[in-house]
Image (cartoon, grey):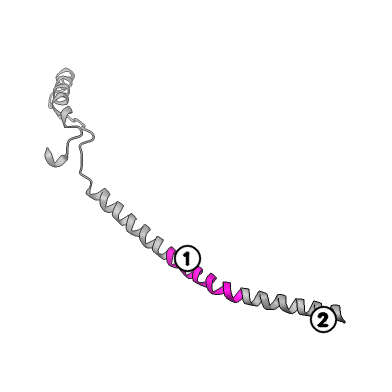
Amino acid sequence: MNTRRLAAFFLLGFITGSLVIFHLTSSRLETLYHEKEALKVNLFETTERLYRLEELWKSRQEEVIRDIKLEINADEKNPFSELALKQAVGELVKGLLGEKVAGV
């Protein structure tokens, strides 16, 4: 009977200790859970704000001349004069590459 009583007290102490530890840690876990959810919301809002700022930045980037395409519409079909004209115009506009559109 003495061993049964000792086992019962041990079991009762174990259960009591478990309940005390559960109550001590449950409030901290709940606080951490709410903090985690608040951080998730904050992350979502920050990500959305970053996305909007990136879109705004892309739309406000200065437009730069990246490519020049020459198209010549001539009444006469002389390929030599057309090539010479393309070469001359190409020499004139090659300095425009990389320039700001507003400055041209």
Q: Which residues are magenta?
A: 22-40
Mark 1 residue type:
Lys
Image quadrant of residue 102? top left
Q: Secondary structure at mark 2?
A: helix
Crowding around mark 2 (Cα neighbors within 10 Å: few <14, some 14 to 19, many 20+) is few
Q: Is residue 56 above or below residue 102?
A: below
Q: Is residue 58 left or right of residue 21?
A: left
Mark 1 or mark 2, earlier in chain: 2
Crowding around mark 1 (Cα neighbors within 10 Å: few <14, some 14 to 19, many 20+) is few
The residue wearing badge 1 is 36
Image quadrant of residue 51? bottom left
Which circle marks residue 5 in the picture?
2
Q: Residue furthest top?
A: 80
Q: Quadrant of the N terminus?
A: bottom right
Residue 99 in percent (x, y) is at 17, 35
Mark 2 residue type:
Arg
Residue 27 on the magenta segment: yes
C-alpha span from label 1 to label 2: 45 Å
Image quadrant of residue 49? bottom left
